[in-house]
Image (tube, rainbow, N blue to C red):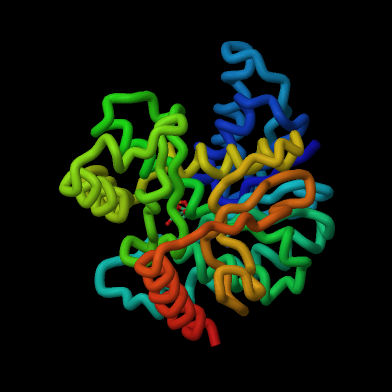
Amino acid sequence: MKVTVIGAGAVGATCADNIARAGVCTELVLLDIKEGLAEGKAQDMQQTAALLGFDTIITGSTNDYSKTANSEVVVITSGIPRKPGMTREELIGTNAGIVKTVCENVLSFSPNTIIIVISNPMDTMTYLALKSTGLPKNRIIGMGGTLDSSRFKYQLSQHLGCSASDLSAIVIGGHGDTTMIPLISKATWNSVPVTSLLSEDQQKQIVADTMVGGATLTKLIGTSAWYAPGAAGSALVKSILRDEKKLFTCCVALDGEYGQKDICLGVPVTIGKNGWEKILPLELSASEKEAFEKSAAAVRSMNEVLG
Ligand code: APR
């Protein structure tokens, strides 16, 4: 089993580190455009093998895609962050160019791979990957909702004083802080609805804090986060390679599901050896449906910038 992570920055390296520690693949390739960066991080990571007890062979590559050949899964984290004075359109334009070229290079050496997109704006980059590669839709997975759902569980666990892994809670819709929809009405602590344990004010606070989860960290750290994004990417890789068929929220191509077509948005899906395998339906309330439609409209307007 072989996995490639494109982009050896904060998120890519963390994702690769988690994949190596999970021991789910025999070969792991880290690729970056910056000379020596991927090779250095790959070697550093490989030097943890004796301490952590994994046998994955980790290789670094400066933009040499032949090293990525025959990867079962490729995770794309390459891109640039938004710089001061940069418009949203400029950011989309730059990252779209990077993601499109990366996809072409990846597929020329791994035509059967499954692609996981992490680069932002993630919903639009996932849509671009789908449209530009023409791959079957099940092989393009946007990671966003997996991360946002984990952040939602974090916020819930803080208020409930419980283990985050005891919670079942998901965030659907877009990955942006105004487009995501934390479904508090459906969240449970094991099977106990959290709405029966939290006041209205607490519920509002948890939803609001989840929605600005990424921005809060950017403010604190001075750049965007990497531990949870990297772990989210790695959880998806593991579910594919082990054919776990775990249920995650991922950004996938909708073809009538949830009332949407020709868009990639976050919905609950099973993740297994074929990529995303099944979209699960959810009974949404009128206000949740309205929020989903608004989210779709906002993502669609970003997708139009691609044109
Ligand atoms: N090919 C390969 N690597 C590239 C390319 C390219 N064409 N263009 C940029 N990169 C690399 C950069 O050299 C850098 O090492 O992508 C890496 C990005 O790393 P960081 O700047 O550290 O960004 P990071 O925090 O990892 O975020 C990556 O994930 O969560 C999202 O919003 C985030 O879009 C961003 C992405």
Which residue is painted at 67% across and 19% down in the image?
A: 54
Tell me where residue 295 appears, x and y as whole percent.
41, 71
| Quarter holding residue 39 | top right
Q: Nearer the viewer, residue 116 or 36?
A: 116
Return the residue found at the far bottom: 307
Give the side of residue 243 with respect to residue 34, left or right: right
Which residue is painted at 27% across and 35% down in the image?
A: 197
Q: Is residue 125 above or below residue 145?
A: below
* Picture quarter with the N terminus: top right
| Quarter holding residue 105 | bottom right
Return the residue found at the far left: 201
* Picture quarter with the C terminus: bottom right
Q: Nearer the viewer, residue 221 or 169?
A: 169
Give the side of residue 307 with respect to residue 219, left or right: right
Q: Is residue 248 above or below residue 23?
A: below
Tell me where residue 47 appears, x and y as whole percent.
59, 20
Q: Is residue 28 above or below residue 127?
A: above
Give the side of residue 169 with respect to residue 78, left or right: left
Which residue is painted at 43% across and 39% down in the image?
A: 228
Q: Is residue 147 above or below residue 288?
A: above
Tell me where residue 155 appears, x and y as whole percent.
30, 39
Which residue is painted at 19% across and 42% down in the image?
A: 199
Tell me where residue 107 appears, x and y as whole percent.
78, 62
Residue 251 visible in the picture? yes
Residue 77 visible in the picture? no
